Image (cartoon, rainbow, N blue to C red):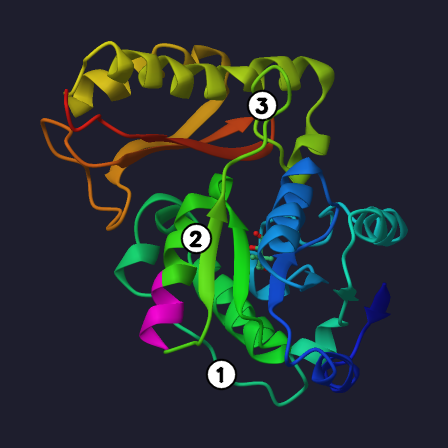
Amino acid sequence: MQTITTVAELRAALAKARDQRVGFVPTMGYLHDGHLALVEASRAQSDVTVVSIFVNPTQFGPTEDLSTYPRDFLRDEKLCRDAGVAIVFAPEAQEVYPAQYDTCVEAGELAKSLCGAFRPGHFRGVATVVCKLINMVQPDIAFFGQKDFQQFAVVRRMAIDLNLPIEIVTVPTVREPDGLAMSSRNRYLTTEERQRALAISRGLFAAEAELRAGERECEKLIAMARRHLDEIDRLQYLELVDAETLEPASNPLTHPAALCAAAYVGSTRLIDNVILKPQVSD
Ligand code: PAF
């Protein structure tokens, strides 16, 4: 495995792999099994896997956790090596955003609801850095976790709209055995908060069970999830949206919809979602 920090070196290393299928897993590091599932998917669907590790400053708001975002580069490197990654690309901030840097990718409607409504500029930062990283790596296929469902939707739209010659793939959320969605930010939780954070996945699973039991009314599915959310400190949103357009889902539910939640447990903001897929025969 090679660890590379500049775009020039990355291009040189990948020039040798141009006749191979290149898979790309963009990350902000502090890797967990969710990231490793993306690596595994990439290894299954490509010949050469590149993982980027870059805590992207432009997707953090002024009061968010950029300075405290967890980092452990040596551990990440080892996990990547053990997982069969070919190249770790870990640029410094000035390599990605040099002094005169003055361009961004503005995501459209898909970025306005859910997290976008509470994190102004977040998806501009995500779309910009993902577009830049894709241009640097020039992969054939890139992998994103379902936990960041809106991010996946924004990136998929961007790739289509900007004619990026790449396939964008989502990989199901990896959960702890008790249901908590894996996230680098889980490390902020105290033991007591972590216990209460389980209410989020419990609520989402309850709505899923209600759908399986035949419920198709959006409000009732949302209410079922909300019933479990008393233990969290502040619910930022709980919304059922069409899985393609991210517009509010309509009754009766006939198309796949994402039930998405963002909530604070203590001072930690967590997000999670489940995809509700009504069976055609129901
Ligand atoms: O999901 C993340 O870790 C980040 O938003 C990403 C896609 C690496 C862009 O910085």
Q: Earlier in the sequence, mark 2 or mark 1?
A: 1
Label 3 to label 2: alpha-carbon separation = 20 Å
Q: Is 150 placed above or below 208 here?
A: below
Q: Is residue 187 magenta?
A: no
Residue under circle 3? 180
Point 72% across, 21% down: residue: 190
Residue closer to the observer: 273 or 87: 87
| Cβ atoms under marks 3 and 2 closer than 8 Å | no
Residue 144 is left or right of residue 2, and the answer is left
Q: Amino acid at mark 1?
A: Thr
Q: Is 273 placed above or below 105 here?
A: above
Q: Earlier in the sequence, mark 3 or mark 2?
A: 2
Residue 190 is left or right of residue 38, and the answer is right
Residue under circle 2? 152
Which class describes the residues within 10 Å of circle 3: few (<14), some (14-19), or many (20+)? many
Q: Residue furthest bottom?
A: 100
Residue under circle 1? 103
Disc assigned to residue 53: none
Label 2 to label 1: alpha-carbon separation = 22 Å
Task: Where is residue 267? Give x, y as percent.
Answer: 60, 31
Q: Is residue 121 visible?
A: no
Q: Which residues are magenta?
A: 157-162
Task: Where is residue 121? Give x, y as percent.
Answer: 44, 62
